[in-house]
Amino acid sequence: MMRSGQVADAVRYAAAHRRRFVTELCDFVRFPSVSADPAHGGDVRRCAEWLAAHLRALGMPHVGVMETGGPPLVLAAWRRAGPHTPTLLVYGHYDVQPADPRDGWHSPPFKPVVRAGAVYGRGACDDKGQLFAHVKAIEAWLNTAGVLPVNVLCVFEGEEEVGSERLRAFLRSHGGRLAVDAAAISDTMMRGRGQPAIAHAVRGQLSFELEVRGPASDVHSGNFGGAVPNPLDALCRIIASLWDARGRIAVADFYDRVRPVSAASRAYMARVGPVDADVRRAARVPAGSGESGYSLYERMTIRPALTVNGVSGGYAGVGPKAVIPARAAAKLSVRLVPEQDPREVDRLIRRHLARVVPRTVRVTMRTSSGVAAAEIDPRHPVVRAASVACEQAYGVAPVFLRIGGTIPVVSTLQRDLGIPTVLMGFALPDDGIHGPNEKFEIDNFGKAIDTCVRFLAEAGSLRTAHRRPGQDRSSRVRPPVVAASEVTT
């Protein structure tokens, strides 16, 4: 077990080198590693190679860039601790969301700048900055103690923003041979500035696209308006049919597997979670929307949601154009709660479309990804270790939050491999992830590194599960999932 003096040395090292760490984070953010756009395939690969080289330079002895048929995995391992020392999987993703629309940015998204105490750029927070906090904590340990307090396997992927399909396949195929005792992920939110949080639930997701076709080509809206089907008009009507007047999803049987959350859990959420005004302020909207009967925090965590992410069709250039488009399309996503199966929800939506689509147009639904929701036991020792580290770094105990977003790998680690996972996030509600002017505050970056340094020490004191390569996952004991309201912290 590491002595407190060694922890203090690592913390001091990180503080002394923070300016360099910020410069290196800017170098990391400079790669436009947009996994959703094939045009950025080369940028994604160059980003992976840069990250691998960085891990080698800081002293990780086994580093590789693994081919997947798509964005590569960056793997790094340090397994020099004793035979009874647990092995921690540290996960992160180096791919980022598209930076569109560009006109909302105050500075170019892939030319990171330091402004007002924060690094601005696409991916600065989601997830390059949070991933980098773990990397810098590893560096701090290796450059002070010379060893890590726990065996570490870093798994950094390049397609989280498009569903993590290849990583999940890799873990299902090789997970039993990784001999990992627990996993740590930093890709979630804090409660607010100075108030750390550990997430104990994430929603799942189903992403799909609707394409509506009418005439063989665009036609004159004066000559044919009112006489031929308009795909854009049909698409609007189809989308409108997906909700009822109360804000509920109007797909038959959609809520059959949505289980109610206990009154105790809702009371805990009301006590520690954001109030409606906080949510509106973070989103910069004057009013909320969605399903009645729930707070905004509840709507975006314990209830499913259907979102239109984009619509295209017709003419959108300067000035008018009298045209009926031949094609219209929309991208949509459904956030799912525990017990909802993405495949079943896909089937229900297709059945709904068969009922509401006009016979005058042709509609195609293409599903791009489906991920189940996941819940985590706040009582698990690795979560307790993260809680101790957060309190030591921030001076206040973390709260347990539900997260409305989706981290695809969590359900694979939890459900398929039985690997306990801690979600220790460092994003602030106003960090602008997925939007323009994304940032990561430098003070919070420093606190995140401090937390990760301490977490490695706390994780090193845990008892190993003594798993061996190839052990069947069915023999692993899965702790029961409980609500955070039932846990004292």
Image (cartoon, helix red, strand yellow):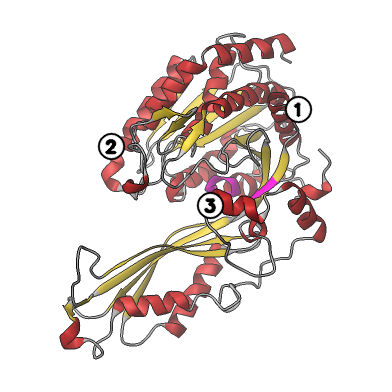
* Residue lying at 78% horizontally and 55% vertically, measured from the top left: 265
Dot 3 corresponds to which residue?
A: 283
Whether residue 182 is situated above or below residue 50 in the rendered picture? below
Q: Secondary structure at mark 1?
A: loop
Pointer 1 or 3: first along the chain: 3
Magenta part of the protein: which range?
401-411
Query: Image check: 61 left or right of 474?
Result: left
Name the side, left or right, on which 361 lies relative to 91. Answer: left
N-term mark: 2 or 3:
2
Identify the residue shown where x is 65% and y is 59%. 338
Residue hosting label 2: 42
Determine if residue 305 is in view: yes
- Check disc 3 and report its element: helix, strand or loop: helix
Residue 230 is one of the magenta-drawn residues: no
- Residue under the point 79% across and 55% down: 267
Q: Does the stretch in magenta take in 402? A: yes
3D distance between C-alphas at marks 2 and 3: 33 Å
| Position of the N terminus by quadrant | top right
Q: What secondary structure is marked by label 2?
A: helix
Q: Residue 468 appears in which quarter of the rendering?
A: top right
Vertical order, 23 against 36 (above or below): above
Corner quadrant of residue 373: bottom right
Residue 435 position, x and y percent, is 44, 47
The reply to whether callout 1 and callout 3 are in contact (CB within 8 Å) is no
For mark 1, what is the residue? 463
Q: Nearer the viewer, mark 2 or mark 3?
A: 3
Residue at 38%, 37% (x, y): give it.
72
